[in-house]
Amino acid sequence: MSIEKPNNLPLSGIRVLEFVHMVMGPACGLMLADLGAEVIKIEPIPQGDNTRRLMGSGAGYWMTYNRNKKSLSVDIKTEKGMNLVKELIATADIVIENFRPGAMKKLGLDYEGVKAIKPDIIYGSMKGFLPGPYEHRTALDEVVQMMTGLAYMTGPVGRPLRAGASVNDVMGGMFCAYSILAALYQRQLTGEGQFVETGLFENSAFLVAQHMMQRAVTEKPVAPMPNRVSAWAVYDVFNTQGNEQVFIGVVTDSQWLAFCEAFDLNSLKNNPDYALNNQRVKARDVILPIIRDALSALEKSKVMELCEQAGLPFSPIQRPEDLFHDNHLNQSGGMGELKLENGKQVKVPLLPFTMNGHRFGVRENVPQVGENTVEVLTSLGYGAAEVQLLTETEIIKCS
């Protein structure tokens, strides 16, 4: 698998301005940046985006979603700083933002304000809710997971549990990037820009649509995943020798035969009462103890080996940090390299798709605050003396 060269990138020549923080906005910018757009992050001086300093579960946000970008550190509360930003807007193709409702309007940088500067601008706004009764509420990934039933579906009865990653934030960024690309294509046809908007709540509703339809089709309450009646008899985590664990899914009748053959379960294979999937689902209480007993006598490596040979879906139970050493990710070109602030080199997963067999890699490390300020101002025609004056008067910061 090869990494796409910078001059061959699909979005080369497209300039994006980011007014974003946390995950959803930066995730959108990341996708555009990895595809070759020049993404310029507008950061406040002197310390830049607060996301840089998050701790705990947020400690990885900054490094994950800000590669391949440039940092312009500017005080937009000053007239000179705002004028600089407006000059930059005049050169941009896309503006994205994910601040609280009304924040960009107060700055005069909402869609109407930006459109007055650049009439064909594509403006991507990422919010908690699309326009409607909830639009002025403040939302978080966890909030909308609770609102839509995603947390209900994830945890056991009475214990709603958010998904273990920022699924709505990342998907919100993805859908914003998706709609921006559609708007770019439409602009080629019409010459007009447009306003595109993404909502966390609507993302989460989209995720649980399958469970809404399950209720509509079955006319029965939908059970949380830990309490669900599975669509398949063998679709679970099994203990192997030494209490190590493997997930195995058997989702077709042909896989059932292959599974039974792989693990010498002839009594199950030859029983006509278990030949069809729905028969096996009804007989889970009989089938599963037999299977669990057979698998518990084998080492985890042997169980996985037999599953792979039989073409069965399976997985060891892993932690996120195990992926740093994942054989497939590393050998297939699915990992890029970043340098942490302490100088340590680390690996990070790349965008999960190819184009003509190419992956989109890390071209530039995550920027320091104001690292590209001089470069960006130079592109606007600012000379060294002007840059020096703006730096001395603390309108901008150059790292």
Image (cartoon, rainbow, N blue to C red):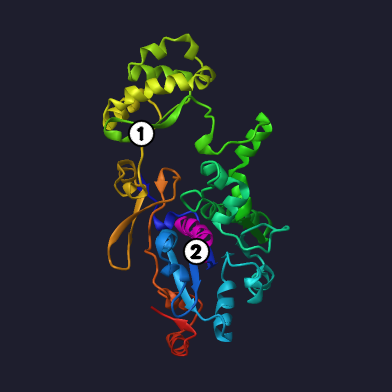
Location of residue 9 by image quarter = bottom left
Sequence-wise first label, 2 or 1: 2
Q: Mark number for residue 82?
A: none
Report x, y in % for residue 194: 67, 60
Q: Residues within 10 Å of mark 1 (few under 14, many from 20)?
A: many
Report x, y in % for residue 31: 49, 55
Report x, y in % for residue 27: 50, 58
Instruction: Report if the CB atoms under discs 2 and 1 are less than 8 Å apart.
Output: no
Task: Tell me if residue 115 can be seen.
Answer: yes
Left or right, 50 with respect to 175, comes to left
Magenta segment main secondary structure: helix
Magenta part of the chain: 21-38
Location of residue 91 by image quarter = bottom right
Q: Quadrant of the C terminus?
A: bottom left
Q: Residue at x 62, y 56 (%)?
A: 198
Q: Is residue 165 above or below residue 373?
A: above
Location of residue 84 by image quarter = bottom right
Q: Residues within 10 Å of mark 2 (few under 14, many from 20)?
A: some
Task: Tell me if residue 309 can be seen.
Answer: no
Which residue is labeled 2 in the image? 22
Left or right, 381 with respect to 349, comes to right
Separation of marks 2 and 1 at Cα, in angstroms: 34 Å
Left or right, 80 with respect to 133, comes to left
Amino acid tagged 1? Val
Amino acid tagged 2? Met
Q: Is residue 124 above or below residue 162?
A: below
Report x, y in % for residue 202: 63, 51
Q: Find out whether residue 373 is within the magenta segment.
A: no
Q: Residue at x 40, y 46 (%)?
A: 358
Viewer-closest of 10 and 388: 388
Q: Residue at x 67, y 30 (%)?
A: 217
Which residue is labeled 1 in the image? 246
